[in-house]
């Protein structure tokens, strides 16, 4: 059993522990956040172990990239939990995403380019996509909770609205910053690898479109102060675009 198998198993255990705690209120003898931290650490060890043995990170195909984004999502969740307090209601979702995406890392065969700018490009993209996905999940949950409150149906999963608002806005801002770095490092990598800063690559074009989209959203929110409902709707739409970009659009130079 390799490190990715162990990481996936721990993510699944953590997801179950969070689910029991969130939906049934069962007490557990070990903190789920500790299980998630250990699962992410095992993935990280695998990630750098591959780099040390091959000189490349395992992000050369869709499986490796999705695995990276999923684990970065867990890392951002753990960071926000540490800084802002409890996010227990999100735990079972994030842990299960970590489980699925880590499993996707098992069939990853290709490794990325050795160029350091490519490494920075991929790592910043992983943080950006993970942050924007977390923001989209927070927005979607927030919209569902608001609908339940309006209908005066308060049973089942309920998450504080203020917590969801902070999560979606912080995650979106972090995602936009790292999306900017993704374009910068991608341009530098293209210049050193292909001899020019920009190529008509579908992945790069869509990344630029995503950057323009989130630049507009962040700018409007800072300048005009978008209403919470409108910001959430735009965040969910961005979430769909990000997932579509990861799942269906690949670099033409792969």
Image: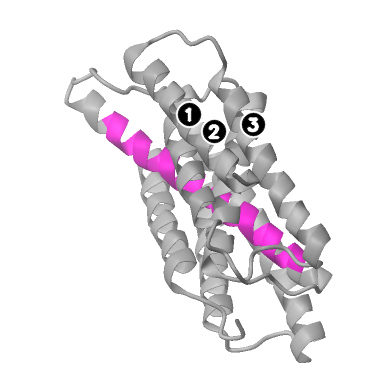
Q: Which residues are magenta?
A: 119-146
* Residue 161 in view here: no
Q: Is residue 123 magenta?
A: yes
Task: Assess disc 2: are there few (<14), some (14-19) or many (≥20) residues with their C-alpha within 10 Å of its C-alpha.
Answer: many
Question: Does residue 160 sit above or below 77 in this rendering?
Answer: above
Q: Residue furthest front?
A: 1
Residue at which label 2 appears? 10
Q: Toward which corner of the image does residue 232 lie, by quadrant?
A: top left
Q: Quadrant of the C terminus?
A: bottom right
Mark 3–mark 2 distance (CA, rounded to whole Å): 9 Å
Q: Give percent across and percent down for residue 98.
A: 51, 43
Residue at which label 1 appears? 13
Q: Residue at x 57, y 17 (%)?
A: 31
**Residue 37: numbered disc:** 3
> Comparing marks 3 and 2, which lies closer to the viewer?
2
Q: Toward which corner of the image does residue 154 lie, by quadrant?
A: top left
Check whether the beta carbons of the residues at disc 2 and disc 1 lie within 8 A of each other: yes
Q: Secondary structure at mark 2?
A: helix
Mark 2–mark 1 distance (CA, rounded to whole Å): 5 Å
Q: Is residue 140 magenta?
A: yes
Which SS does the magenta portion mostly show? Answer: helix
């Amino acid at each position: 059993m390799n490190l990715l198998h162990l990481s996936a198993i721990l993510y699944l255990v953590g997801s179950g522990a969070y689910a029991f705690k969130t939906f049934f209120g069962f007490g557990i003898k070990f903190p789920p956040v500790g299980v998630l931290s250990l699962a992410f650490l095992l993935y990280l060890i695998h990630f750098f172990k591959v780099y040390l043995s091959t000189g490349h990170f395992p992000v050369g195909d869709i499986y490796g990239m999705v695995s990276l984004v999923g684990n970065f999502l867990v890392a951002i969740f753990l960071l926000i939990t540490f800084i802002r307090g409890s996010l227990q209601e999100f735990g079972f979702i994030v842990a299960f995403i970590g489980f699925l995406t880590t499993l996707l890392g098992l069939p990853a065969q290709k490794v990325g380019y050795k160029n350091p700018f490519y490494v920075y490009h991929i790592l910043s993209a992983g943080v950006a996509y993970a942050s924007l996905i977390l923001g989209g999940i927070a927005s979607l949950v927030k919209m569902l909770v608001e609908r339940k409150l309006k209908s005066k149906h308060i049973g089942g999963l309920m998450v504080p609205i203020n917590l969801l608002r902070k999560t979606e806005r912080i995650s979106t801002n972090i995602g936009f910053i790292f999306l900017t770095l993704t374009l910068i490092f991608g341009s530098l990598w293209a210049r050193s690898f292909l001899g020019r800063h920009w190529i008509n690559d579908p992945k790069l074009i869509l990344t630029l479109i995503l950057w323009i989209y989130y630049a507009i959203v962040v700018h409007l929110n800072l300048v005009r102060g978008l209403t919470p409902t409108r910001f959430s709707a735009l965040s969910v739409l961005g979430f769909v675009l990000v997932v579509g970009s990861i799942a269906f659009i690949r670099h033409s130079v792969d």
